[in-house]
Amino acid sequence: MGFAATLGERLFRWRSDGNGPVRLGQRRIFILPTRAGLLYAAALVAMLTGAINYGLALGHALVFLLASLAVVAKFHTFRNLYGLTVTPGRCDPVFVGETASFHLHFANDSDRPRLALELRAGDKGTVSTTRVGASSQGEVVVAVAAGRRGWLELPRVRLSTIYPLGLFVAWSYLQPAMRCLVYPRPLASELPATDAIATAGERRGEGGQEDFSGFRAHQPADSPRHVAWKAVARDAANRPLLVKQFAGGANEELMLDWQLTSDSADSETRIAIVAGWVVAADAEGSRYGLRLPGREIQPDTGPAHRHRCLEALALHPA
Amino acid sequence: MSTRAAEALDRGCAPWLLAAALAATAPHAEHQPLWLSALSAGLFTWGAWLWWTHRRLPGTWPLLLLVALATGGILFEFRTLLGRDAGVAMLVVFMALKLLELGSRRDATVVVTLAYFLLLTHYFYSQSIATGAWLLMAMTLATAALVRLHGGPGIPARSTLRQAGVLLAQSLPFMLALYLLFPRVSGPLWGLPQDAHAARTGLSEQMEPGQIASLAQSGEVAFRARFTGPLPPRDKLYWRGPVLENHDGRRWRPIPGRGQAPRIEALSPPVAYEITLEPHQQRWLLALDAPGALPANFGLAATLTATGREPLTYRQRFDLTATVDFRFNVDEEAGILRRNLALPPGFHPRTRALAEEWARAEADPAAAVGRALALFTRENFFYTLQPPLLGEQPVDEFLFDTRRGFCEHYAAAFVVLMRAAGIPARVVTGYQGGEANPVDGYLVVRQSDAHAWAEVWLAGRGGVRDHPTRAVSPARVEGGGATAVAAGEPLPAMFRLRGDWLRTLRYRWEALENSWNQQVIGYNVQRQRDLMMRFGMADPDWRSMGAALAGIGALMLAVLAAWALWRRDRRDAASRLWATALRKLARHKVNCAPWEPPLQVVRRIEQEAPGLAPAFSPVAMAYIAARYGDRPDMLDDLRAAVAHLP
């Protein structure tokens, strides 16, 4: 562990804050002058020299007032963070290459608004700015680029503010135990050929093409055979073209098997290909299942199933 | 990494910055050359117009060109870029140009810092109450601009201003402590530029006809005096400036050098007074005739003028004494007497002829004095602030043709008459009289009280003050300039005040101004020392004052920290009591979360610490009753139950 990290650990108490709410007390808030503050100080020194040299009584008063202003502003900057409560919120899964959005909830129980709060995850994350009104709550999204599949831990978040005068920066490190699931990057490729599709043995409930389940609006790609001409004829002037819909969608059940991908590709690429199949199959509305080495998910449809499949892929050991 | 969105300047900031910049620069228009003010005003307007019409700011090159042009203009106007005035002009132009370059928050920070800096430059020119008030306003605006800059859009202007006001109000106690306790340094740290102290009105080292008359139209305060005892009568209040002995036919000049110390014979007990001189850029003290003990660095010339080594460049206070009835230099040096008889050849032939005729007719030199004064009384002489222009022989023309003049005409003509009659004489300039302010008891002497009189030397009596103007217009000595001037002549507004309430108002304002000058502006090393000693510091120096400052500063910081850390407890009484009960449980190693339902806590205690259960159950019941029941006195039960908890 490097010196800076050791120092940081000692000084800033970098450790996980868990899942509970974190209240920013005075031990967690650090404060230092900003670059603008240093410029201000330099200007004050020059002004004081001028005031002494020219014997300007009001010049002294001005310099002293400006110096006092900085001191007071420091307390205001501190107070802008002090007593704020931060609670970890949700974080929806994303694909590799997208940006993970960690939601943090702010609760402000004081009767003054907290303005210009800046959050940055890690050392190089983008800065998001927020404010919390007096006696109210707010939510802020901390954006972190998702680079690898699997669990993305929220890096240490630096919550800072330079309000009101920008002469001092007060900051606090937040380390809520938050993680975001990162799905593998889906590689667009053709779904496995029909002969490679295993037809699942048991299929219950949902019918085939004849199992009428409702109408939906016509889209250019729909076959004319499925247009509900009778319904259109009843009130041709006002009714849009409707298409008959059938439950089940497809006859076949897809079993997206790891084995179907090329042996020559490395395992990450194979995972990406399977992820692409999952996304494509889900978009088609097919029933699909997933077979990975050591894991099998029975065919199903719907967002929860899609999540289950992608999660399995995301967490699949390399 | 993308550019930080927070660094960009949002549109709503510009008006604040513009207002702050304008407030910080506008008062300079009063003394800056017109073209500079016009240029800055043009740049301001341009910037405001660009903002209003959503146009792009000009790029680097037009701005560089403007900088070059403005610098050239300033160099041409002031012949330098370094002096005080040129430096201020550069700052003003930079400020105006910076507004055309507002792109990021950093630019805005520079504008506000520059505005703060520019505030200081106003004090080079004025430290009056009005300037102080204006600058406080400008500072509030600049601070509000910073608050707006960092607070972001969407906050009402009123709360931005209020936030700035709160910041400034909280700074005031610190400022006061620093002002009183910060060890003061007297005098400049290094040499000041040539134009550090601009010329101000006041007496000058030489006298020409018409000079004092122009001074007499100014209501500006020359100095203020406060007597320890009663105020001496008005006609004894002669404040002596330079004594002019050298005459070239037109101008009067002092003889350089201090000469021998004068020999003063006091005829009345001395009076003590304190004088506060406005800076007049000259070396004399304007002490009351005849001066007694003088402050260090000042000496008394043979002509009774108290002079120092350095010009008075800032307002200064001195403690002096004077003897208003006196005789001096009864045995004057022959050289000086000879000098006071000299007249330039070829000048004033008619005046000299008249005086020589008097000298022949009268044996006693004092009689010539009487004749001259009688001349002014008898003949048709007028006293006016606007005398006609005089030609090559000013004294002759005044005495025989125009006969209209101000005190310097009379003094000059009188001295020429005396010298021609063989009586040593000289012109004395200074101030006469003054106006007592009933509010604070200070005697205010204005530029309009500037005066010239004559001094003749008579054997056995020494230097004698003669007042030829009095022969024309006795009111001049008794009532001040305003009553002496003929009706219909233009006069400064101050003189025209008639109504009593207006006069009272003026007295009050001037008393306020004076106490501002004395207490606030005049707070210097000496005053600081006095004040510290009054607070019981034995020997105040920078160390003890620094320690006091540190102590008071620490105290104020503690108050501020307490204010910042203070949080109002928003829970109601029942919740607070419940929290107390939970804290007591924690002492017995039963840890409960604040959100745990009371009955569940009771169940847990029955399992984990059965001994506590009998005491705790009533607490839970009372809490539930207080929380959800409708009897108002349940809180008392809860309080009692909590108190019973071990």
Image: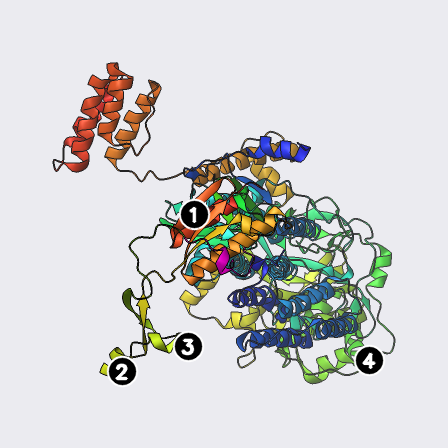
Going by the numbered disc 4, the residue's amino acid type is Pro
Q: Are marks 4 and 1 on the same chain?
A: no
Which sits in the foreground, B545 or A106? A106
Residue at the spot of label 4: B349
Residue A238 — which label? 2
Q: Position of residue B240 (x, y in %)?
A: 68, 58
Eye-nearest disc, 3 or 4: 3
Going by the numbered disc 2, the residue's amino acid type is Asn
**The stretch drawn in magenta includes residue A194:** yes
Which type of secondary structure does the marked residue at label 4 adopt?
helix
Taken as a whole, is the magenta stretch helix, strand or loop? loop
Q: Name the residue located 52 percent from the left edge and 53 percent from the top edge.
A: A275
Q: Position of residue A273 (x, y in %)?
A: 56, 54
Neighbour tally class for label 1: few under 14, some 14-19, many 20 plus, Cα within 10 Å: few
- With respect to residue A117, does B359 lie above or below? below
Q: Position of residue B145 (x, y in %)?
A: 53, 60
Q: Please tell me which of labels 3 and 1 falls first in the chain.
A: 3
How far apart marks 2 and 1 lie (CA) works out to 43 Å
Going by the numbered disc 3, the residue's amino acid type is Pro
Numbered-mark total: 4
Q: Are marks 2 and 1 on the same chain?
A: yes
